[in-house]
Image (cartoon, rainbow, N blue to C red):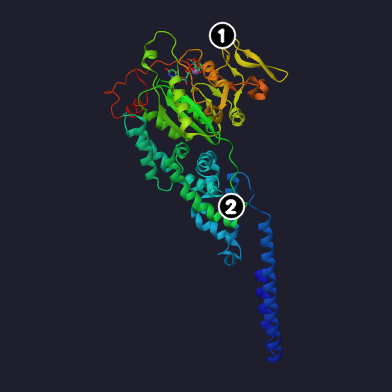
């Protein structure tokens, strides 16, 4: 188009060479025409651009989509002829407040969908009215994440075997300090947000960003968060431990607004476990709760995972107010849709668990929409003959029962805990997994592996095997 105006202009000049008045007139006409066409074209251009903008609104909805839209919007704004006019208007606020957003979001978006979840969960816990900041923070997280992983890996592996929750916490803090931009990004942050200290680190940037976002684009808000999930996972040291946690962790990574309470039956935390949890990237809190000595010594069945789960309950009594808790053993299999269903439980929810006893499944029996009994290969006089993987409880409901806990009674852990939630009417039990017609959790059991044989240190000196060796479990 511009080429056309130029040829029109030069044509006018050339034809006015013979007569000076005519030349002046035609020159004047040319200039007029040129200006008219220029103004008209500019107007058309601006109208077209406005139309283009109106076709790409910021839809209120999913956070990742915001990011994509916002970046494409900003990109088109940059090539616009009215960019100067707009430079000080509303959009400037967005680009000013988060320079990293504009530069990194398009590339980062696809690779960090799950990371986004971590962040939005974190931000959500820190403050309700975060608005656009959650998606904006996601971008800087995405960009800086690889660095964080590296520092986590080395820091924690080198921290040696001296354990204790406090030790781990210190390591985490120092890492958070090193990664200056990542105030709210670390995997553990949601946990710490619940605890007061990190709520403080998470809040300031969120508030600062939301101030701008709210002034300018009221529709640019994060999706509302679903109720939080607290997943209590007992674990203990054995050759399969890191493999089990890895598998479960990546299942949980598909679930938003979740805090994973990993509680080890041990006296000290294990840096290798912490490292594995960091690598997975699900918000977690790692604690220890050893089985009391008297049970450890016994030749009879042990109350496995009981002190761990009671430690988890204690944590929730101090740090949680809403949402739902679920006991997820580290070796079971979980369909992620059960997590989305259990979030909305008001009191207690139940559903079938596959691979339990000779019946192949342990399940509530439902007739005409009502809970009429339980199906399980071993009833054992239990009021609630259900498996640990087959129920979840509302945090509020738990907190209204200050004495509720799990007994150290092998085989009766679930029953004892559910009984301790009295009063609990059968009609209050919500039946999930399509009213217990579907199986979404399985009591899978991993084959026990013998401890690895000792490494010949002379033969494999200065090889990678010296490093791998530190990851293995020996008697
Ligand atoms: C079955 C049930 O599914 C468990 O919920 C129940 O706790 C257990 O029986 C029991 O009553 O003893 P099962 O597969 O036999 O589970 O037990 P494990 O998977 O070996 O242990 C259950 C949980 O406790 C696991 O998450 C495991 O990591 C943990 N555990 C096990 C410990 O913390 N310490 C131990 O010494 C053993
Ligand atoms: Mn098991």
Label located before the other in sequence (1 or 2): 2
- Identity of the residue furthest to the right in this view: 368
Determine which quarter of the picture holds residue 431. top right
Left or right: residue 362 compared with residue 469: right
Residue 270, image quadrant: top left
**Residue position for label 1:** 381
| Camera-side mark, 1 or 2 | 1
- Tell me: is circle 1 under 8 Å from ligand 1: no
Residue at the outermost left position: 458
Instruction: Check disc 1 and report its element: helix, strand or loop.
Output: loop
Q: Which residue occupies 63% across, 48% down?
A: 60
Taking the image as drawn, is residue 186 in sight? yes
Q: Do the residues labelled 1 and 2 touch (CB within 8 Å)?
A: no
**Tag 2 residue:** 70
Q: In which quarter of the image is residue 299?
A: top left
Neighbour class for label 2 at 10 Å: few (<14), some, many (≥20)? many
Front one among 287 and 370: 370
Q: Which residue is rendered at x = 59% and y = 57% of the image? A: 216
Q: In this view, does 3 lie above or below 179?
A: below
- Residue 411 coordinates in the image, percent (x, y): 50, 12
Dot 2 lies on which element?
helix
Q: Position of residue 244 (x, y in %)?
A: 47, 24
Q: In this view, does 243 lie to the left or right of 361?
A: left
Q: Is residue 183 visible?
A: no
Q: Distance between the residues labelled 1 and 2?
A: 60 Å
């Amino acid at each position: 188009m511009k080429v056309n105006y130029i040829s029109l202009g030069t044509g006018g000049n050339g034809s006015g060479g013979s007569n000076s008045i005519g030349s002046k007139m035609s020159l004047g006409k040319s200039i007029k025409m040129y200006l008219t066409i220029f103004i008209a074209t500019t107007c058309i251009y601006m109208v077209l651009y406005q139309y283009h903008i109106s076709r790409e609104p910021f839809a209120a909805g999913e956070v990742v989509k915001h990011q994509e839209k916002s970046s494409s919007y900003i990109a088109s704004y940059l090539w616009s002829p009215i960019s100067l006019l707009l430079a000080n208007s509303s959009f400037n606020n967005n680009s000013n407040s988060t320079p990293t957003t504009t530069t990194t979001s398009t590339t980062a978006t696809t690779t960090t969908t799950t990371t986004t979840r971590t962040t939005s969960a974190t931000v959500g816990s820190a403050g309700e009215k975060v608005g656009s900041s959650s998606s904006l923070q996601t971008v800087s997280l995405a960009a800086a994440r690889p660095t964080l992983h590296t520092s986590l890996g080395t820091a924690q592996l080198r921290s040696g075997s001296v354990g204790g929750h406090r030790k781990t916490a210190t390591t985490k803090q120092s890492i958070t300090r090193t990664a200056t931009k990542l105030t709210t990004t670390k995997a553990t942050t949601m946990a710490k947000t619940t605890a007061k200290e990190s709520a403080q680190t998470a809040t300031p940037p969120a508030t600062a960003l939301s101030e701008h976002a709210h002034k300018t684009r009221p529709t640019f808000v994060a999706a509302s968060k679903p109720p939080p999930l607290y997943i209590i996972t007992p674990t203990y040291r054995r050759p399969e431990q890191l493999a089990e946690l890895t598998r479960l962790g990546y299942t949980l990574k598909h679930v938003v607004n979740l805090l994973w309470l990993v509680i080890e039956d041990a006296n000290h935390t294990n840096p290798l476990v912490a490292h594995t949890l960091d690598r997975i990237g699900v918000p977690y809190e790692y604690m220890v709760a050893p089985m009391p000595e008297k049970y450890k010594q016994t030749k009879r069945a042990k109350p496995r995972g009981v002190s761990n789960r009671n430690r988890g309950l204690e944590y929730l009594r101090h740090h949680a107010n809403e949402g739902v808790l679920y006991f997820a053993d580290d070796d079971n299999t979980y369909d992620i849709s059960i997590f989305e269903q259990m979030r909305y439980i008001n009191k207690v929810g139940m559903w079938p668990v596959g691979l339990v006893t000779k019946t192949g499944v342990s399940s509530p029996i439902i007739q005409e929409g009502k809970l009429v009994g339980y199906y399980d290969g071993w009833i054992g006089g239990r009021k609630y003959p259900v498996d640990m993987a087959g129920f979840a409880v509302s945090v509020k409901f738990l907190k209204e029962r200050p004495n509720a806990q799990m007994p150290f009674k092998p085989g009766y852990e679930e029953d004892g805990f559910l009984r301790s939630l009295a009063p609990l009417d059968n009609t209050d039990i919500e039946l999930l997994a399509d009213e217990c017609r579907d199986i979404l959790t399985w009591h899978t059991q991993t084959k026990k592996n013998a401890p690895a044989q000792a490494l010949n240190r002379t033969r494999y000196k200065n090889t990678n095997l010296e490093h791998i060796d530190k990851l293995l479990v020996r008697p």
